[in-house]
Amino acid sequence: MIHPGQEGTAVNSIGVLGLINLFFAVVIGLYFWNLLRAQHGSKSAVGRESRRELDKLRDLRSICLTKPLTELTRPKCFEDVIGQSDALRSLRAALCGPNPQHVIVYGPPGVGKTAAARVVLEEAKKSSLSPFRSDAVFVEMDANTARFDDRGIADPLIGSVHDPIYQGAGPLGIAGIPQPKPGAVTRAHGGVLFIDEIGELHPIQMNKLLKVLEDRKVFLESAYYSPDDNNIPQHIHDIFRNGLPADFRLVGATTRPTRDIPPAIRSRCLEVYFRALSPDEVATIASRALDRVNMGAEDGVIDIVRKYAQNGRDAVNMVQLAMGVAVTEGRKTLLKADMEWVVESGQYALRPEKRVGDSPAVGVVNGLAVWGPGMGSVIEVEATAVRAQAGRGSFMVTGVVEEEEQGDGGRVLRRRSMARSSVDNVCTVLRVRFHIETPDFHVHVNFPGGAPVDGPSAGLAMAVAVLSAVRGTPIDNRLAMTGEISVRGQIKPVGGVVAKVSAAAAAGARRVLIPKENWQDRLAQVEGCHVIAVDDIDEAFELAKVGSCAAAEQPSPAPVPQEVVAARSASAVFSDHM
């Protein structure tokens, strides 16, 4: 039985509890209402900020400058790539067939490596034999900027996984789900991945890339991935189980020599060599650049570019700067003075252009060498010989590398250079084949120009020069030669013969002597130059003398004292290995 006083107390307690509940309900309601208001206000603020940023982007995109001349002159077809017919043929064979290959392109800067890669993909997409589809992509990366994180947070080349612990993981990260991020190898799927300066790629990324080239897919790992986690979306399960697709063809370009590229990547790629452009080819690029901008040029302007531009990029830049001078002065024609000012202000160096001598001379021979892939040059070998007391003579050689070092596996091997070894072979040949004792003469062989010369291919030129100096026999100035000489007087094969013959023809040589073992049928088609294969020093010397075969048309030189030989200069850096 409840007394009236107790009933009033219970009612009062219920009323107080109700008020307390009401108070907390109001507080909680106000809290969530404020949250909703703040969220709505935040969304409104974000929306306003987004609209302002979009307006800024539209304003920025509405501003457009004129295209630079380098972009206007960028090759759009094979015919626009100047001077690289052999390299383009190799690229087309590698990428436009039914089974395209990975390619590494070597060559100096500014000769069209990147442009050729773009052009060859467009050509491949048009081929019915090629597996590249019409929408195949060309993804370009620079190895210098393809940096990665050791923890695997970011890798723009291979791809990475954004784990939940890292900032910016988004809604999936909040749920503890790792997020795969595809890299360039996946974006290039079905197309071409072009890596510029591939020789600068970090060794770790190089090894990862090798694995991708073999598997044609990218496998990613994460400590936060569990195959039994049902909260992870199916597409992420699929990526971790089967990998990201990465079936592409790699085209890497580099200015480094082949020895600086890891053998593992070289063995998986076809190697294509772009050569340096000749002065005439540089002049062609400059003329086309002027045509693209409808600009006239005074006679002699292109000749200045021809003499100073080292590559196609230099030629276009020189034309663009000279055009800027002319336009700002209200002219539509480039003057020689404009281009001369460009040369002076840009501090362009005169391009060395070796030509054969004007007349035959005693002890002067045109040798041949290579100083890079597909790049040959004419070098001058000069010799003097003065009779000395029997056995008290000397044999001096200047302008060659004295010794060389080779290091591998923690040890360094040092030996005499191959050029110095060729000198000893020459002395032996003169003694055995021609009964000339070099200790009876003061002999001096010189390679003028100041650039170090190395390699065995100067042996034939040295032997002919010394023999000419000792006998006082003039040598045909329109003849060039290359070949290693043995102690028995045989002419041994050397490397880079095609490049050497091309350089000789460009320098004005009418005949070229090469080792018989280096003969190729296409050498018979060299324009303006007769290539002769020899295998013995006697045959080579007879052909080199003035009055032999085609040399008979050369005017006889004035008598030259046996001990005096005229000298001319040459310049190049040579390393002639097979």
Image (tube, rainbow, N blue to C red):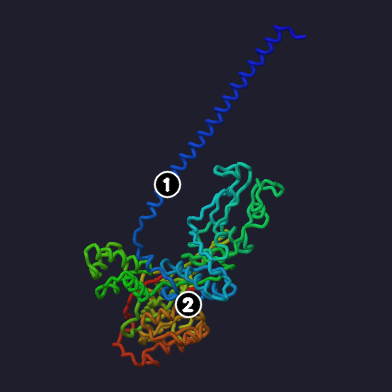
Query: x%, y% of residue 392?
Result: 40, 77
Marks 2 and 1, the one that precedes in the sequence: 1
Look at the image and tell me whether residue 442 can be seen. no
Residue extending farthest right: 1
Q: Which mark is residue 86?
A: 2
Tell which of 297 and 242 is nearer to you.
Answer: 242
As shown in the figure, which amino acid type bears the numbered disc 2?
Asp
Tell which of 131 and 276 is nearer to you.
Answer: 131
Lateral position of residue 410 relative to residue 196, left or right: right
Look at the image and tell me whether residue 45 can be seen. yes
Find residue 94 and report its image quarter: bottom right
Front disc: 2 or 1? 1
Residue at the spot of label 1:
53
Q: Is residue 529 positioned above or below 242 on the image?
A: below
Find residue 248 and report its image quarter: bottom right
Query: x%, y% of residue 216?
Result: 62, 63
Query: x%, y% of residue 296?
Result: 27, 72
Q: Secondary structure at mark 1?
A: helix
Tell which of 53 and 387 is nearer to you.
Answer: 53
